[in-house]
Image (cartoon, rainbow, N blue to C red):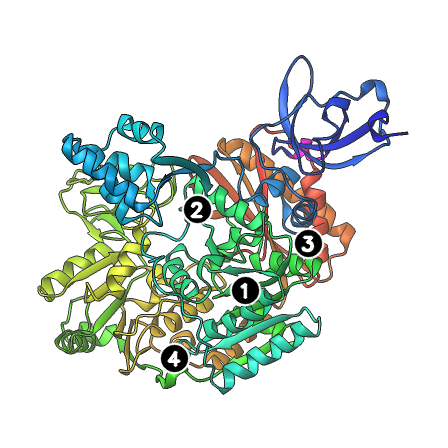
């Protein structure tokens, strides 16, 4: 019997992210759709009472009904212009749902890098149908008839005879009417050809006409040992996990490229993950010079059409290397051979939306199921990765020398308490100011890092202590130099205040320092210096990152001031001084990883100095010069920092020693939130008694660090366990419970950042 004569049934996840509907529903596939509905297809289905139509994803197909056939409805239609999901991504999505906690629908949407089919870009080309002599004859005729438009077109076509002319160039820049073009087409002098082309994702700063260098990469002994070892494993069919711990400037990228050469030569594809969109410019520039048009970029700054075209190129095997932030891990390669996670320690590799997945864990899972290798690289590895490497679960390699013989910078720790005693009230310490004067006189470049954007930290009344806060979030507003107070969480804005809204006092003033304030102080202290600022406010536009970094790379500015985005992975050979204006900003946050984050930021910032021929200097300004995160970063001693920090984590049962599950209960109604929190606490206690209390600890409930965010109130539980599986079981049980309160959400986050 043919398949068409058999009834087929589809298990469908409906496109609604509600826990009570987080299961599959079975539908019959009509004969008219049997050749179009496969696992991963998005379909329209009837749901519930009446004629309500919703969408859903087909996750599997079978010939066996699970319920009474009379109760099974038919699929209505296939969603047109929607991207489907292949079997591998469906499997990955369900694994993510299990490991990280979310609805199946949320996980399925997460693994689809592109949601809709976008109309293809069509380019029209004007090509000659006759030889050059005939074109010259037509040109003479046009001159005699004073047909100036036709004359311009023929002149350009003769000059570009072999390549032809872009239709838009002729009509727009040459200002030639369509009637002129049609007349030459009718006379069979020219023809107009249309062809589908891909939209470029490489950005304006990448010169695609620049000659690609295919010269061999020259590796030093350390780099070659690592590259040869990984390539040897790959050729032998061993697909493993590797951690390259290399000091800043040690040439990890050259090792990546060497291994990539081998992987793409074997017919496989590569995903290259970077933590920040701001790193795209330099990474793409280096990779384009090496690999040319075989690379593409996927990130959130691309247009819908650009993202769709890169998706198609990867799906069709027309690109071999994709570069992008964490979502690029879902690139739909059919022949994946290698995933590289550069700067693997970065917190941006942890998703902020449900499912709150770890990109590292997803990469390991995808590589395991698709037969690929994974390389992690960092000058400051996460404690999780380094612990796994020390335990033998990941192969560890070390790069201890800077590439090209460059020296590590000299780091100076400045105690800001001493600056105050010396009556220096400036944001620049005496040491930093002296070095800035020196570098500017030598025409060398400077980077200044502060971990806050805006003009100031907060606005406070000196009379009554009132702090101007966001009405929708439990945070202070930040003053910007456009005269507005802005919430950096929800975007709320209001005009700056001149009198205290609480007591009416005129003594209300901004406190703290942001990037805008630093820029103002630079212009005041060093009036001849050319300054660029890079933060969330100056990089709102699509090409802002590339434009700012390109200008600084071309030495169109002397000083680059910015937030974290300027200290991660950039390679500017003329930078010989890095100033870290206040190293303590990340040290005393309510985060068990605060020392690790501080060490990473300081080490990465310091690593931007002295990457060329001239040796660099770094100035760390701090009120706590004795802290081990600061002292170890000053001497580039990662292992010393690791030993201190891992001892603290073991003592306090924090990851990676133990695992942690964060449970957030959220609701716009504060009363409903508190009632639901009590019920969740009772359910947690009940489940833990069933699991066994040994090796598991509960903390909370307590208000979230920002209790009110965008008019939603939030309570938090933290649960620690030496057994990750116990936390997963607890998450599953709590996820199945039904809330009696309306509009209450329960979110899970494993080993939160």
Q: For mark 3, give the secondary structure.
A: helix
Marks 2 and 1, the one that precedes in the sequence: 2
Q: Which residue is mark 1?
A: 340
**Farthest residue in the top direction?**
50
Query: In the figure, is residue 525 to the left or right of 134?
Result: left
Q: Which residue is mark 4?
A: 631
Marks 4 and 2, the one that precedes in the sequence: 2
Marks 4 and 1, the one that precedes in the sequence: 1
Tag 4 near tag 3, CB within 8 Å? no
Q: Which residues are magenta?
A: 19-23
Work out how far the residue at label 2 is from the one at label 3, CA to CA, in angstroms: 32 Å
Q: Quadrant of residue 269?
A: bottom right
Query: In the figure, is residue 42 to the left or right of 115?
Result: right
Q: Nearer the viewer, mark 3 or mark 1?
A: 1
Magenta residues, dominant SS class: helix
Q: Is residue 584 magenta?
A: no
Q: Which residue is mark 2?
A: 300
Q: For mark 1, give the secondary structure.
A: strand
Q: Which residue is mark 3?
A: 727
385 or 277: nearer the eye?
277
Marks 4 and 3, the one that precedes in the sequence: 4
Crowd rating for badge 2 (residues with CA inside 10 Å; few <14, some 14–19, many 20+): few
Work out how far the residue at label 2 is from the one at label 1, CA to CA, in angstroms: 19 Å
The x and y percentages for residue 23 are 72, 35
Q: For mark 2, give the secondary structure.
A: loop
Work out how far the residue at label 4 is from the one at label 3, CA to CA, in angstroms: 36 Å
**Farthest residue in the right direction?**
1
At 24% across and 47% down in the image, what residue appears? 459
Work out how far the residue at label 4 is from the one at label 2, CA to CA, in angstroms: 37 Å
The reply to whether residue 655 is visible in this rendering is no
Marks 3 and 1, the one that precedes in the sequence: 1
The reply to whether residue 333 is visible in this rendering is yes
């Amino acid at each position: 019997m043919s398949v068409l004569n058999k009834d087929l049934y589809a298990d469908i996840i409906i496109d609604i992210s509600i826990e009570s509907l987080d299961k599959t529903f079975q539908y019959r596939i009509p004969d008219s759709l049997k050749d179009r509905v496969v696992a991963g297809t998005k379909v329209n289905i009837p749901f519930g009472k009446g004629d309500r139509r919703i969408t859903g994803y087909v996750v599997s197909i079978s010939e066996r009904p699970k319920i009474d056939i009379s109760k099974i409805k038919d699929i209505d239609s296939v969603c047109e212009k929607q991207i489907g999901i292949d079997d591998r991504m469906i499997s990955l999505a369900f694994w993510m749902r299990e490991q990280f906690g979310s609805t199946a629908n949320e996980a399925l949407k997460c693994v689809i890098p592109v949601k809709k089919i976008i109309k293809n870009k069509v380019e029209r080309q004007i090509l000659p149908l006759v030889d050059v002599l005939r074109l010259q004859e037509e040109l003479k005729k046009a001159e005699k008839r004073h047909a100036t438009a036709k004359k311009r077109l023929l002149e350009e076509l003769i000059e570009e005879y072999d390549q032809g002319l872009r239709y838009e160039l002729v009509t727009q820049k040459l200002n030639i009417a369509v009637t002129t073009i049609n007349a030459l087409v009718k006379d069979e002098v020219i023809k107009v050809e249309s062809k589908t082309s891909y939209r470029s994702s490489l950005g304006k700063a990448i010169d695609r006409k620049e000659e690609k260098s295919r010269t061999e990469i020259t590796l030093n002994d350390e780099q070659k040992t690592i590259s040869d070892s990984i390539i040897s494993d790959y050729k032998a069919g061993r697909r493993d996990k590797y951690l390259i711990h290399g000091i800043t400037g040690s040439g990890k990228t050259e090792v990546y490229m060497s291994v990539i050469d081998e992987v793409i030569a074997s017919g496989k594809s590569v995903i290259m993950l970077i933590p920040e969109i701001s790193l795209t410019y330099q990474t793409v520039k280096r990779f384009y010079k090496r690999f040319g048009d075989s690379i593409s970029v996927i990130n959130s700054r691309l247009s819908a059409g650009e993202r769709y075209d890169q998706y198609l190129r990867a799906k069709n095997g027309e690109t071999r290397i994709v570069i992008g932030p964490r979502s690029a891990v879902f690139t739909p390669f059919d022949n994946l051979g290698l995933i590289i996670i550069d700067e693997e320690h970065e917190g941006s590799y942890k998703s902020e939306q449900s499912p709150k997945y770890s990109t590292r864990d997803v990469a390991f899972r995808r590589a395991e199921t698709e037969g690929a290798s994974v390389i992690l690289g960092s000058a400051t590895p996460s404690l999780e990765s380094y612990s796994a490497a020390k335990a033998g679960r990941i192969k560890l390699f070390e790069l201890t020398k800077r590439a090209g013989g460059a020296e590590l910078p000299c780091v100076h720790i400045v105690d800001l308490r001493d600056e105050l005693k010396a009556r220096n009230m400036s944001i620049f310490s005496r040491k930093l100011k002296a070095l800035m004067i020196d570098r500017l006189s030598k025409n060398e470049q400077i980077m200044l890092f502060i971990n806050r954007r805006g003009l100031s930290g907060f606005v406070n009344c000196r009379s009554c202590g009132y702090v101007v806060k966001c009405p929708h979030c439990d945070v202070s507003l930040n003053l910007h130099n456009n005269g507005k107070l802005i919430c950096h969480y929800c975007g709320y804005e209001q005009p700056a205040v001149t009198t205290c809204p609480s007591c009416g006092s005129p003594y209300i003033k901004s406190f703290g320092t942001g990037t805008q304030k630093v820029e103002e102080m630079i212009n005041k202290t060093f009036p001849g210096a050319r300054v660029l600022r890079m933060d969330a406010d100056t990089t709102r536009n699509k090409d802002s990152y590339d434009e700012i970094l390109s200008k600084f790379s071309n030495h169109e500015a002397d000083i680059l001031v910015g937030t974290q985005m300027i200290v991660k992975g950039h390679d500017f050979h003329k930078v010989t001084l890095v100033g870290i204006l206040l190293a303590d900003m990340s040290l005393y946050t309510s985060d068990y990883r605060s020392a690790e984050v501080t060490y990473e930021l300081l080490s990465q910032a310091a690593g931007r100095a002295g990457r060329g021929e001239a040796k660099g200097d770094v100035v760390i300004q701090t009120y706590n010069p004795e802290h081990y995160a600061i002292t170890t970063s000053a001497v580039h001693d990662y292992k010393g920092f690791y030993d201190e920090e891992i001892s603290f984590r073991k003592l306090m049962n924090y990851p990676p020693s133990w695992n942690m599950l964060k449970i957030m209960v959220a609701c716009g109604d504060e009363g409903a939130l508190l009632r639901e929190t009590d019920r969740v606490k009772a359910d947690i206690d009940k489940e833990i008694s069933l699991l066994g209390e040994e090796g598991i600890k509960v903390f909370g409930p307590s208000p979230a660090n920002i209790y009110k965010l965008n008019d939603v109130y939030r309570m938090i539980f933290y649960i620690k366990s030496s057994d990750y599986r116990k936390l997963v079981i607890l998450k599953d049980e709590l996820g199945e419970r039904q809330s009696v309160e309306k509009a209450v959400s329960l979110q899970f986050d494993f080993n939160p950042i």
